[in-house]
Amino acid sequence: MLQDNPGNLHPGNSIITAVVSALLAGTGGAILTYIFGKKKTQAEIENLKAEAQKNRAEADKISAELKGVLSYSLAASDEQILFDGTARIDGFDVRGNEGSFWANGKPTSSKGLGELTFEDGGILNVQRKNKDGRFELLFQRYAYGGGQYQTIPKDDKISGKRKVRVSCEAKVSGAEHSLRFMLREPNGGRLAEQRVTVKANEWTKFQAFLSGDPLECALRVDDEIDPASGQPPGSVQIRNILLAQRK
């Protein structure tokens, strides 16, 4: 009679061990596949979230820029647009001029030296070469009563004062620049003016409210720099300029 040898496995046990090993191997592979697949899926989800946040930020930026443009290009219901520089502006619309300060019919300063250029995005760029005098921006295209004019026409139908609002964005590099918005008659008489100071190298919104007699006039914007400023004259940029008259 044969006796079992304790040192040898029963043939049945070998089969069972092999099956269990195979099952464990398969299960382990499935588990590993699941774990790594889950990590990959999670990484893809995170990437999608990051991409969505990026797209949302870009959309918010575009929306803010569009709102900024619309706020300038659309006049209030009780206004008519005389000049709109939000869509297009060039040398046919605005002319640069180097000017001096005057008193009693005589110049009291040297001319404000500089150059006007028209940059992409409808930007007026005044590059100053000194701090003396002023550099003048002469606006020479206006829409009025269905027509186009080089000046704002006299209007006897207006009761009281002509009320004009000027809005724009501006920024500077170098010294602070003072912008003086002025309604000026062809003979040089000033009907109204208001001054703002541009200090930052970031686009900043400005508005000027000009009230004067409803005579023939034009908009002039003077760029002035304090001669005592310790900074170089630098430059001033203006964009989205809009001229609107109260109806």
Image (tube, rainbow, N blue to C red):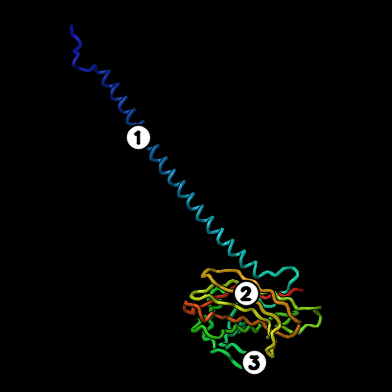
Q: Residues under labels 3 and 2: Cα distance? A: 32 Å
10 Å crowding of disc 2: few (<14), some (14-19), many (20+): many
Mark seen at residue 166: none
Q: Is residue 165 above or below residue 108?
A: above
Q: Is residue 241 above or below residue 134?
A: above
Task: Name the front one of labels 3 and 1.
Answer: 3
Which residue is at the front of the view, 218 or 21? 218
Secondary structure beneath disc 3?
A: loop
Quadrant where the C terminus is found in the figure: bottom right
For the residues labelled 3 and 2, say whether their Cβ atoms are less than 8 Å apart. no
Q: Residues under labels 2 and 1: Cα distance? A: 68 Å
Type of amino acid at the residue the image marks with label 3: Asn
Q: Which residue is mark 1?
A: 29
Q: Earlier in the sequence, mark 3 or mark 2?
A: 3
Type of amino acid at the residue the image marks with label 1: Gly
Secondary structure beneath disc 1?
A: helix
Type of amino acid at the residue the image marks with label 2: Ile
Across and down, in percent, residue 108 comes to 58, 90
Quadrant where the N terminus is found in the figure: top left
Q: Is residue 28 above or below residue 117?
A: above
Q: Which residue is mark 2?
A: 241
Which residue is at the front of the view, 60 or 245? 245
For the residues labelled 2 and 1, say whether their Cβ atoms are less than 8 Å apart. no
Across and down, in percent, residue 156 comes to 80, 83
Mark seen at residue 104: 3
Across and down, in percent, residue 181 comes to 64, 78
10 Å crowding of disc 3: few (<14), some (14-19), many (20+): few
Q: Earlier in the sequence, mark 3 or mark 1?
A: 1
Which residue is at the front of the view, 242 or 202? 202
